[in-house]
Image: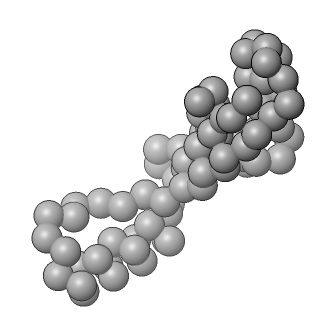
Amino acid sequence: MKARVTVTLKNGVLDPQGKAIEGALRALDVEGVTSVRQGKVFDIEIDTTDHAKAEAALKAASEKLLANLVVENYRVEIL
């Protein structure tokens, strides 16, 4: 089974990398960019056909390793 875990910074957490990307896009004359927030995407293959079991395992992995729950949110999608 294939899944995707998306990790993003919580609202209100400063994002210096996002600001740097935003500045670089403006320097490249990309028009209309008003804000950039960066994050992480993990594409994961898990050896199960049980949707609930896969989701539970990926939530546990996210909370233990993939995301820093103090400053980040995560979303698990079974693809």
Please state which of residues 6 and 51 is positioned toward the viewer in this rendering: 51
Left or right placement of residue 39 versus residue 19 in this view: right
Q: Would you say residue 55 is visible in this rendering? A: yes
Q: Which residue shows up at 33% across the image and 72% down it?
A: 22
Quadrant where the C terminus sits is top right
Quadrant where the N terminus sits is top right
Instruction: Check the image and report above or below for 78 versus 21.
Output: above
Q: Where is residue 70 drawn, in percent x and y?
A: 70, 44
Please state which of residues 22 and 58 is positioned toward the viewer in this rendering: 58
Q: Which residue shows up at 43% across the image and 57% down it?
A: 37
Please state which of residues 34 and 1 is positioned toward the viewer in this rendering: 1
Q: Where is residue 24 drawn, in percent x and y?
A: 33, 82
Left or right placement of residue 44 versus residue 36 in this view: right
Q: Which residue shows up at 40% across the image and 74% down it?
A: 21
Q: Would you say residue 56 is visible in this rendering? A: no
Q: How is the image coloured?
A: one colour
Q: Which residue shows up at 49% across the image and 60% down it?
A: 38
Instruction: Check the image and report above or below for 29 versus 79.
Output: below
Occupied quadrant, residue 51 = top right
Q: Residue furthest left?
A: 31
Left or right placement of residue 39 versus residue 63 in this view: left
